[in-house]
Image: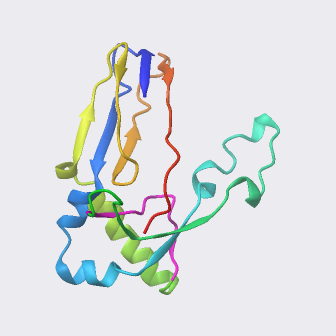
Amino acid sequence: MHLWEVPKSGGDTLFASMEAAYDDLSERMKIYLDGLNATHSGEQIYRGRYNNQKHDDSKRTYPRNVHPVVRTHPVTGRKSIFVNKRSPHINEIPKAESDSVLAFLYSHCAKPDYQVRFKWQPHSIAFWDNRCVQHLALWDYYPQVRSGYRVTVKGDKPF
């Protein structure tokens, strides 16, 4: 990502290592999560956000994908947690159990120990690997603007 215009304050991006988050899980939790899959969808985040743009707000607008809860990096072989708030359900377990496990994982992954904060300056460039890192852009700079380009490399199928 390259930003050429950044706000005087705010607009930072948090990056969190899901490999570090996985490494800190208990061995029992790692065993429990191994082989579980989660459905991923942007629907619960984006539904209704674009109502004034006259686009189709149906389920087909929000494609769903199933990915492992723990994925293995195809280059390094390291394991990482691969769920986020767009992962509303773990498929192989009952909803109540899934909700509890996901709430734990969301909380666990949000620990500051796994995060770095990137403070943007004009013409900063940031690279990250979506296979093992989560990111969060902070929207705390209104009415200032943040402008730039983001390029995403086509990913691989998680395993």
Give the magenta part as a residue range.
78-91
Spot the residue most to the front.
75
**Horizontal arrangement in the rendering, residue 25 relative to residue 82 (left or right):** left
User: To which quarter of the image does residue 79 belong?
Assistant: bottom left
**Which residue corresponds to the image point at 33% horizontal and 54% vertical from the top-left?**
132
In the image, taking residue 142 as reference, residue 82 lies left or right, namely left
Image height check: is 84 above or below 69? above
| Residue 155, above or below 51 | below
Nearest the camera: 119 or 155? 155
User: Residue 118's spot in the image, x, y percent?
Assistant: 28, 31
Q: Is residue 67 left or right of residue 60?
A: left
**Which quadrant of the figure contains the N terminus?**
top left
Q: Main secondary structure of the magenta part?
A: loop
Q: Which residue is drawn at 24% across and 60% down?
A: 21
- Work out which quarter of the rendered image holds the C terminus and state it: bottom left
- Between 109 and 20, the one nearer to me in the picture: 20
Q: Residue at x 29, y 58 (%)?
A: 109
Residue at horizontal 40%, vertical 16%?
7
Is 72 part of what is drawn in magenta?
no
